Amino acid sequence: MSDFVSVPEIFGSDVFNEATMKQRLNPQTFQAWKTCIQNGTPLELSVANEIAEAMKNWALEKGATHYTHWFQPMTGITAEKHDSFIEPSGDGRVIMEFSGSALVRGEPDASSFPSGGLRATFEARGYTAWDPTAFAFVREGSLYIPTCFFSYTGEALDKKTPLLRSIDEVSREAVRILRLFGDTETKRVTPCVGAEQEYFLLPKSLYAQREDLRLTGRTLFGATPPKGQELEDHYFGTIRTRVANFMIDLDQQLWCLGILSKTKHNEVAPCQHEMAPIYSSANSACDANQLAMQVMKKCAAKHNLVCLLHEKPFAGVNGSGKHNNWSLSTDSGKNLFSPGKTPSQNAQFLVFLSAFIKGVDEYQDFLRSTVASAGNDHRLGASEAPPAIVSIFLGDELTAVVDSIIHSTNYKDPGKSLMRIGVDVLPSIPKDTTDRNRTSPLAFTGNKFEFRMLGSSQSIAGPNIALNTIMAEVLGEFADILEKAQDFETALQKLVCDTLTQHQRIIFNGNGYSKEWEEEAKRRGLSNLRSSADCLPAYVSEKNIRLVTKRGIFTESEFRARYEIHLDAYCKMVSIEAKTSIDMVLHQILPAATAYTKDLCDTLTVKKSLSVPATAEEKLIARLSDTTNRLYEACEQLKQNMDTIPEGKEEAALYYQNVILTGMADMRKEADILEQLTAKSYWPYPTYSDLLFY
Ligand code: ADP
Ligand code: MG
């Protein structure tokens, strides 16, 4: 078999990972790097020089000619600028060089990345600094070095820097709690993340014919096809050969890059698929997800397909999200969200659980804002994705435990009268219950929380920064109380019981899609921030600013800068969509409809001259003309409205949401009627049937 690949052999073969470092570095250098990542101590330049030399030699063997500081600016995607290794050797030839300082620090000319006002143009330089906790890799002839990106004054201009800060912070506070339970060993606690990635694949030839897909990543028009996802024949269905070949190729590329791609399957909507990796540390999961999204796009192109990562490429069928599975693990591999088998483990688990519940309840709006985007607005609350209301699903077993603690009432297990913290053994919480609540935005799934509100195209950094930070904050508050307690057991009982009592409103096990839940959530006082324009201002509430600054995750100006960038991105996206809609109406849809109408009119004239009945033509012409006129009016209105965008960013965002998106919907309604009235041969772009059932 010529195609045989040994997965263990190719796995990580393009990564300068720990095994390769161990092989290629001298033992002292390797140890210095290990100590650096374990204790967060800086690397000596001499050590960096040695690592750089080894990295370069390895990369050259892999065919690399360039290196790049790979970073994650606030656009949510990644950026790279490539420098070759060449240095003149003085005799008209070159040698390949790479120094420790080039590894550790770079200066991309970064004046065009969004900085939300953090960087005046006169000091436009941004700097990149190697993140030695993430592995470098070779791809398409370049050595990629994962880096942080910051301004001249040291402000974070990226998503990795605050993520690393939040990882340290939650580790520090979690270790304090572990000490209280007699754990003297654990030095670090690491947030672990597995990000399940949904995507659509379309034939490139069809995609190329749609201006909306090319410019905005989603269809702005398209009548509902005769068939959608109602037969439920795509979910977990047989994968068609063309897609299967793409998936084989994708997996091999991901494995070479050390990405633990584990699961692949068809999703609910036609043409929709998913890739889920095995979880890893939050930092590496974030890099891996960014890389996976890029590899998906490039790999699709190779197979004459296009990979759509947009949250809602098609109206009427499911959109794409990203499930962010999150847990905390000690350096010896103990999962702090595993319900323990002993009374003491039970108590410790309940402390982490109640801290999470409190944190999510108090910072619902913060979590919600981290998933806000123009694309995701089409999903959240649309009976396919979780609602815009943040709540936690615990499942029956754990809810029974929580109820018993809150009410001091009988625990449902007949053998026990009460569930006593630190005395009883927790029930086993099934990892894989079939009735898993898919409508919940944040579900406990046995030993981790699954945050399901993320959009498919977004960086997972933001939501994980929020999860780590709120967890650090509440664990810190708990540690303050428990460290001072005279009687640890009593204080612990009271803390867990009080916390669960005060924050039980955030727990909801029912149907998150239902109207009743919306009303119930309102009675409970939970926030329901429906859209980006609604929730982004909450991002910079006093409470949230206090949280992130106190925890050292963002300075106030860094945090406000992100808010500005998100608002700006939202407005720009809707603006591009509106302009694309107008363009398509004026240059494609109206001309097609009028051309068809004209031909019908010609037919009508001929038929009339022959005294042949022509009621079909007459009626069609009338309907086409009416609809065409209404479409033209709607288009004119939208154009006018686009000329009066308010100055302020917050006002602009609300205006885009309430006026522009509504105007686009009005236009789409008429355009989609025209699509159904017009003969196929006149229609200027592939329809939903063409796209989804190719
Ligand atoms: P489920 O059936 O609950 O969805 P899976 O085992 O299929 O569980 O996992 C879904 C995702 O969650 C995968 O990416 C997996 O690696 C990840 N995952 C599993 N355990 C953990 C954990 N302890 N922490 C973070 N992610 C995890
Ligand atoms: Mg899942």
Image (tube, rainbow, N blue to C red):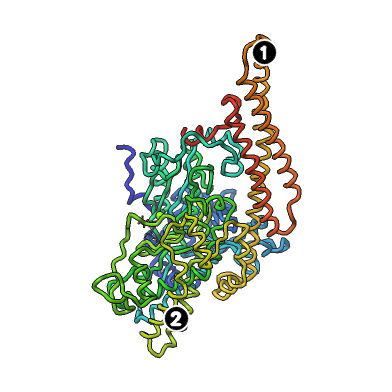
Residue placed at 73% from the left, 40% from the top? 636
Asked which secondary structure carries label 2, the reply is helix
**Image quadrant assignment for residue 193:** bottom left
Question: Eyeballing the image, is 402 above or below 225?
Answer: below
Q: Is residue 348 left or right of residue 201?
A: left
For the N terminus, give its image quadrant.
top left
Q: Mark 2 and mark 1: span between their CA atoms?
A: 89 Å
Q: Quadrant of ligand 1?
A: bottom left
Q: Is residue 429 left or right of residue 382?
A: left
Mark 1 vs ligand 2: CB below 8 Å: no
**In the image shown, does 368 or 182 lie closer to the viewer?**
368
Instruction: Tell me the residue at 64%/58% (across/down).
Output: 567
Of 318 and 409, the residue lying toward us: 409
Return the residue nearer the eye: 645 or 522: 522
Label 1, on which residue? Answer: 608
Mark 2 surroundings within 10 Å by alpha-carbon count, few (fewer than 14), some (14 through 19), many (20 or more): many
Residue drawn at x 35%, y 78% as measured from the top left: 408
Residue depicted at 56% across the width and 26% down the height: 680
Residue 628, compared with residue 322, is above or below; it is above
Mark yes or no: residue 86 visible: no
Tell me whether the residue at label 2 lies in contact with that at label 1, contact meaning CB atoms closer than 8 angstroms: no
Q: Which residue is mark 2?
A: 479
Please identify the quarter of the rendering in which residue 632 is found. top right
| SS type, badge 1 | helix
Q: Position of residue 233 (x, y in %)?
A: 39, 39
Q: Nearer the viewer, residue 7 or 594?
A: 594
Q: Quadrant of residue 634?
A: top right
